[in-house]
Amino acid sequence: MSWTHDIKSSHDYYEHVEDSAREMVKYSGLMPNDSDIYDTVHEWTDNSVIYYTDCANILHFSANNNAAFEEMGPECIEGKTSVSEVNTVLAYFAYSRDLSTALTQIEEDEAHELLKHVQCEECDSWHENETEAQECCAEEDEEGE
């Protein structure tokens, strides 16, 4: 979640966002396509924007620095009384969109691996643990006999 290295380019920024998306999957225990993960996106974005990042870096390197205006219109900055408050809102929406996009780019197999799921050797279906994976096709084999 925290920025552990200096962000000096858009490449560095998006690499960090992709790493954060993978960490979110591991932390939440949810698959990237699970609708509940978006609560985690908002929590992660709050923490990143408020505690761990420089909003100016997000706004400088994100391609989504207009996301707040696109989602809320000019109301997104209504009542804001400083550049810092405006930048925080803009950075929040940009980073949230970047994380959401990064989540959609995580392949299903990679997500299962991040969650330490185990794949059945016979049918390739994913399971939460080794026992379930071993029993998966064994049950079908027993029924077929």
Image: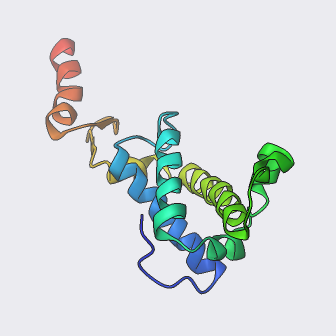
User: In x, y percent, where is residue 30?
Assistant: 39, 40
At 25% across and 37% down in the image, what residue appears?
128
Q: In the image, is residue 77 above or below residue 51?
A: above
Left or right position of 123 against 86: left
**Residue at image coords 66%, 75%:** 56
The image quarter containing residue 138 is top left
Percent position of residue 62, x then y: 69, 69
Image label count: 0
Q: Position of residue 38 (x, y in %)?
A: 53, 41
Above or below, comparing residue 143 to residue 120 in the picture: above
Which residue shows up at 75% across the image and 54% down it?
67
8 or 30, which lies in front?
8
> Which residue is rendered at x = 77% and y = 49% of the image?
76
Q: Is the residue 58 above or below the residue 110 in the image?
A: below
36 vs 60, left or right, is left
Left or right relative to 66: residue 113: left
Q: Is residue 19 left or right of residue 118?
A: right
User: Which of the colour schemes (rainbow, by chain, secondary structure, one colour) is used?
Assistant: rainbow
- Residue farthest toward the right in the current orientation of the protein: 74
Q: Is residue 59 above or below residue 74?
A: below
Classify residue 140 by image quadrant: top left
**Where, quadrant-wise, is the C terminus in this rendering?**
top left
Quarter where residue 71 is shown: top right
Looking at the picture, tell me which residue is in the foreground, 51 or 57: 51
Q: Quadrant of the N terminus?
A: bottom left
